[in-house]
Image (cartoon, grey):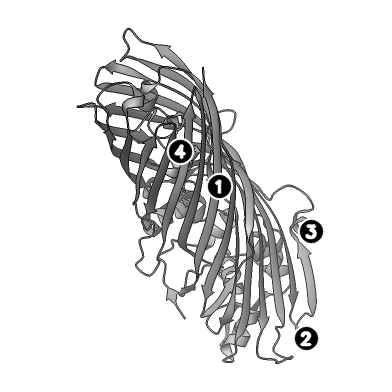
């Protein structure tokens, strides 16, 4: 088995907040998106320009436009996860979804000469797809998921009845108390909090554990961008984006006694949860492209953090069978709160800064006539400051923070201790054959975790074809993705944590069609 110690600061407070570090990473460790043409070249659009998707990467690329256009980019995505948990290999079901790549309008701004001008663009893009179906199981003789609830309750200083009715505790802990999954016991004259499954482990027993998590939704960004020429060699641009978050996760965790003993106070426990995050944010993208000679383009872009206003909603159930201890009991979150809506949590989230450096080389770029261009090769290097992401308290109508000072300190400190800044590398190219073009690309994201034991990366291979004739264009692309990540069924503050190694394979087909005007 593989274990890992985390330097989590007072982790029980994270459980009661419902925020965990993954909530921040979900907004920044993303896959390439955009039009079919952009995705075919690995997502590299930091210096190439002349594409509506420039507004989401480097808006200075809008400065290459001399005619307006309308673009639509429907797509289809599927994915399948394979997991290794405590030496047991499992495969999740295939998840699929429709999404939309960069679509919208570009309105050209005439310049004073054929080599000057720019454009204003309004568009929409699915920047993140949350679709997944992660399933794993294994046998654990080291820890139980009930221990996270025992830790939180022990640190609360509350009595059992107080804990069940105290909405500052997580639903899991309150339901564990209600169903007697955890209880107090006097051991050696000292009152302790103990989970019933721990009795199995203390007797050298084994627990079967099974985790099934399905997520869907994504981040759809609406943006307004403007870019133009400052001189014959310099272009500037800016985009204001409004991303809309819609994330849903349905989770089921099952733990059962694997010993076959029917008189050790634990048979099974099942925890299910329906969790959603919805909200909206705002960000800005600033860009510059410099063309020292006609065949070379060098670009730099700065993406500010997205400042989100988000709301989490959670509903949960727990069913526990403690045999002769308390028999079988079930409870829901509504039972505990009597439909008060206390399962909702509003908060602000600042995502990561991003900086991008890019270069492109154009073959046959002796003039501004695009028909003379025979192709290109382009590459981006993006640096993502994951450790700067942070949760903040929203303010009330009078401008005061809703939550007390320090409310999010634990999870923010954990983000800094848990993540590291990472790089995204993107490389692609195109060859033109009169009205047809062939494209290929690659994208690779490095590990966002600080701990050496955690291995994560993302690799995307892409290829596509394009048609351009008389102001009409059609592009078709397929992207094959390979993601390596880790998944924690639960976390403990006082002992090592078990986790699953997850490998996700994705396939995305995207079609872009449009016309010039």
- Depth-wise, is mark 4 or mark 3 nearer the camera? 4
Crowd tier of the residue under label 1, counting other residues whose Cα lies within 10 Å: few below 14, some 14–19, many 20 or above: many
Label 1 element class? strand
Q: Quick one: label 4 or label 1, which is nearer the N terminus?
A: 4
Q: Position of residue 248 (x, y in %)?
A: 64, 50
Residue under label 3? 335
Left or right: 272, with 8 as reference point: right
Look at discs 3 and 1 and give the one toward the viewer: 1
Seen at 27% across and 28% down, the residue is 365
Q: Quadrant of residue 375?
A: top left
Q: Position of residue 428 (x, y in %)?
A: 36, 44
Tell me, for residue 509, which label it has, or none. 1
- Judge the density around disc 2: few (<14), some (14-19), many (≥20) Cα neighbours within 10 Å: few
Mark 4 to mark 1: distance in Å?
12 Å
Q: Nearer the viewer, residue 466 or 102?
A: 466
The label on residue 37 is 4
Q: Earlier in the sequence, mark 3 or mark 1?
A: 3
Residue sitting farthest toward the top: 112
- What distance separates the C-alpha of mark 4 from that of mark 3? 52 Å
- Residue at x 69% of width, y 75% of height: 181
Q: Which sits earlier in the primary sequence, circle 1 or circle 2?
A: 2
């Amino acid at each position: 088995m593989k274990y890992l110690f985390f330097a989590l600061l007072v982790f029980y407070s994270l459980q009661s907040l419902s925020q965990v570090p993954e909530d921040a990473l979900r907004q920044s460790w993303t896959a390439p998106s955009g039009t079919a043409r952009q995705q075919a070249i690995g997502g590299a659009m930091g210096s190439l320009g002349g594409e509506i998707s420039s507004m989401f990467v480097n808006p200075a690329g809008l400065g290459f436009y001399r005619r307006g256009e309308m673009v639509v980019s429907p797509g289809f995505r599927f994915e399948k996860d394979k997991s290794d948990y405590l030496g047991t290999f499992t495969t999740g079901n295939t998840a699929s979804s429709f999404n939309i790549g960069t679509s919208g309008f570009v309105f050209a701004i005439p310049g004073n000469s054929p080599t000057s001008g720019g454009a204003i663009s309004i568009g929409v893009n699915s920047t993140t797809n949350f679709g997944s179906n992660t399933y794993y199981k294994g046998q654990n003789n080291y820890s139980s998921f009930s221990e996270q609830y025992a830790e939180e309750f022990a640190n609360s200083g509350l009595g059992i009845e107080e804990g069940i009715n105290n909405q500052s505790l997580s639903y899991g802990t309150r339901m564990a108390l209600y169903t007697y999954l955890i209880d107090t016991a006097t051991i050696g004259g000292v009152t302790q909090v103990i989970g019933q499954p721990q009795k199995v482990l203390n007797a050298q027993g084994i627990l079967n554990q099974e985790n099934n998590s399905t997520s869907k939704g994504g981040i759809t960004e609406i943006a307004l961008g403007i870019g133009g020429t400052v001189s014959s060699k310099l272009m500037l641009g800016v985009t204001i984006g409004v991303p809309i978050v819609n994330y849903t996760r349905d989770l089921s965790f099952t733990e059962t006694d694997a010993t076959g003993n029917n008189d050790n106070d634990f048979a099974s426990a099942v925890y299910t949860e329906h969790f959603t995050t919805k909200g909206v944010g705002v960000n800005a993208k600033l860009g510059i492209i410099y063309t020292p000679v006609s065949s070379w383009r060098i670009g730099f872009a700065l993406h500010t953090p997205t400042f989100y206003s988000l709301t989490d909603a959670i509903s949960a159930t727990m069913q526990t069978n403690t045999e002769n201890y308390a028999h079988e009991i079930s409870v829901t979150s509504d039972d505990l709160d009597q439909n008060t809506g206390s399962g909702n949590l509003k908060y602000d989230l600042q995502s990561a800064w991003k900086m991008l450096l890019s270069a492109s080389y154009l073959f046959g770029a002796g003039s501004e006539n695009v028909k003379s261009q025979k192709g290109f090769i382009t590459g981006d290097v993006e640096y993502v400051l994951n450790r700067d992401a942070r949760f903040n308290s929203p303010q009330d109508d009078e401008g005061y923070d809703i939550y007390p000072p320090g409310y999010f300190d634990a999870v923010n400190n954990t983000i800094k201790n848990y993540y590291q800044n990472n790089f995204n590398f993107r490389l692609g190219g195109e060859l033109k054959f009169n009205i047809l073009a062939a494209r290929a690309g690659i994208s690779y994201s490095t590990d966002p975790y600080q701990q050496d034991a955690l291995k994560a990366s993302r690799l995307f291979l892409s290829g596509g074809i394009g048609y351009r004739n008389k102001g009409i264009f059609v592009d078709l692309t397929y992207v094959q993705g390979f993601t390596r990540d880790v998944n924690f069924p639960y976390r403990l503050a006082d002992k090592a944590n078990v986790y699953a190694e997850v490998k996700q394979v994705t396939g995305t087909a995207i079609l872009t069609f449009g016309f010039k005007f």
